[in-house]
Amino acid sequence: MIGWVIALAIVAILGAAGGIGWSRLLKEHKEARSLPLNAVDFDKLNDGTYHGAYEGGMYKWRANECDVTVTNGKVADIQLVGSEDPGAENTDYEMLYDRVIEAQSLQVDTISGATLTSKAYLQAVENALLQAQRE
């Protein structure tokens, strides 16, 4: 009888811990989904190289930094400088950056299966480009 009580207590504790972890994960996903990515006017960019960083959100899982080069008022190059994202090797950030350069916009298709991480990379690009905007 005591064995069953202990087993049920362990199951209850594990269930509660799992519920708390799941709740935190959902909050972080909601935060990442809600990144606006609409503060840059691509028609008003000054030439230069600008450094952008995104702190990674609530739990810092998607922290990343990039350098964005603007030439002749257009985004010409984006280089990832660093990433704290544990899944970064599974995200084709170069393809994402190429989409931004081609579209001259942050409103691009994200990487399939890596939507939240893609938005984090785009947030760092936006933070760099905010510095490049002409008044």
Image (cartoon, rainbow, N blue to C red):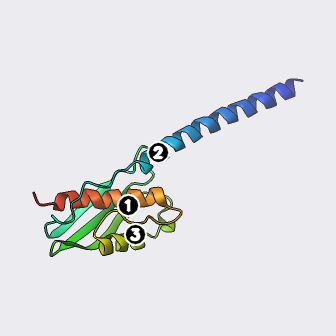
Check the image and report above or below for 64 versus 92: above
Residue pushed farthest left? 135
**Number of callouts in the render?**
3
SS at mark 3 in the image: helix
Tag shown at residue 121: 1
* Residue 60 appears in the picture as rendered: no
Horizontal and vertical percent for residue 129? 23, 61
Disc 1: CA contacts within 10 A as few (<14), some (14-19) or many (>=20)? many
Q: CA distance from mark 3 to mark 2?
A: 21 Å
Check the image and report above or below for 17 versus 96: above
Q: Disc 1 vs disc 3: Cβ atoms closer than 8 Å?
A: yes
Tag shown at residue 96: 3
In the image, what residue occupies the spot 37% across and 50% down?
A: 35
Q: CA distance from mark 1 to mark 3?
A: 8 Å
Disc 2: CA contacts within 10 A as few (<14), some (14-19) or many (>=20)? few
SS at mark 2 in the image: helix
The image quadrant of residue 126 is: bottom left
Tag shown at residue 93: none
Q: Return the residue at label 2.
A: 30
Q: Quadrant of the N terminus?
A: top right
Which one is closest to the eye, mark 1 or mark 2?
A: 2
SS at mark 1 in the image: helix
Task: Identify which amino acid the numbered label 3 is placed on.
Answer: Leu
Check the image and report above or below for 30 versus 3: below
Task: Identify which amino acid the numbered label 1 is placed on.
Answer: Tyr
Task: Identify which amino acid the numbered label 2 is placed on.
Answer: Lys
- Which of the two residues, 63 or 28, is positioned nearer the viewer here? 28
